[in-house]
Amino acid sequence: MSESAVRLGEAGELLLSGVLDFRTGPGLRKEGQALIKSSAVTALVIDCSAVAKSSSVGLSLLLAFMRDAAAAGKALSIRALPDDMREIAQVSGLTELLAHP
């Protein structure tokens, strides 16, 4: 199992990695929220290319990060959504929401 993390990358990138599930979700939620609030940029990109596996918790995290960005007056987009997260989004009717900043 890979270690899960959310960290700030270059120029407004939030790099999400590892396994996103009920064990890792709460910590990632707090860390991501703090990174979004403290970021000086007005447009953020969540890069999911290093996500190894995700349950519905991963989508919940993305939605929470979208709310955090909106509350901070920042645009947010998502890049490289993994297949398992994309499938859950389609079943949940969230594909359109996640596709737009």
Image (cartoon, rainbow, N blue to C red):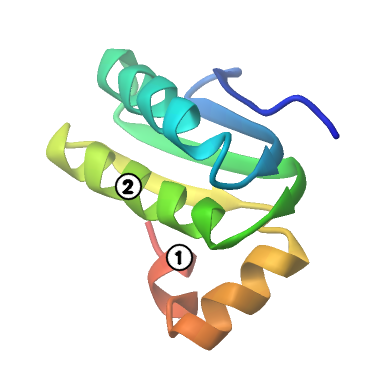
Q: Circle 1 sits on which residue?
A: 98
* Residue located at (46% from left, 82% from top): 92
Q: Viewer-proximal residue, 35 or 84?
A: 84
Left or right, 7 with reference to 100: right
Left or right, 13 with reference to 83: left
Q: Circle 2 sits on which residue?
A: 64
Q: Provide residue 91's location: percent of width, then percent of height.
A: 54, 86
Quadrant the N terminus occupies: top right
- Give, as a three-letter code, the residue at label 1: Leu
> Which structural element holds mark 1?
helix
Crowding at mark 1 (Cα within 10 Å: few <14, some 14-19, many 20+) = some
- Indicate the quadrant where residue 15 lies: top right
Left or right, 5 with reference to 30: right
Counting labels gives 2
Q: Earlier in the sequence, mark 2 or mark 1?
A: 2
* Residue located at (72% from left, 67% from top): 84
Q: Is residue 54 above or below residue 2?
A: below
Crowding at mark 2 (Cα within 10 Å: few <14, some 14-19, many 20+) = some
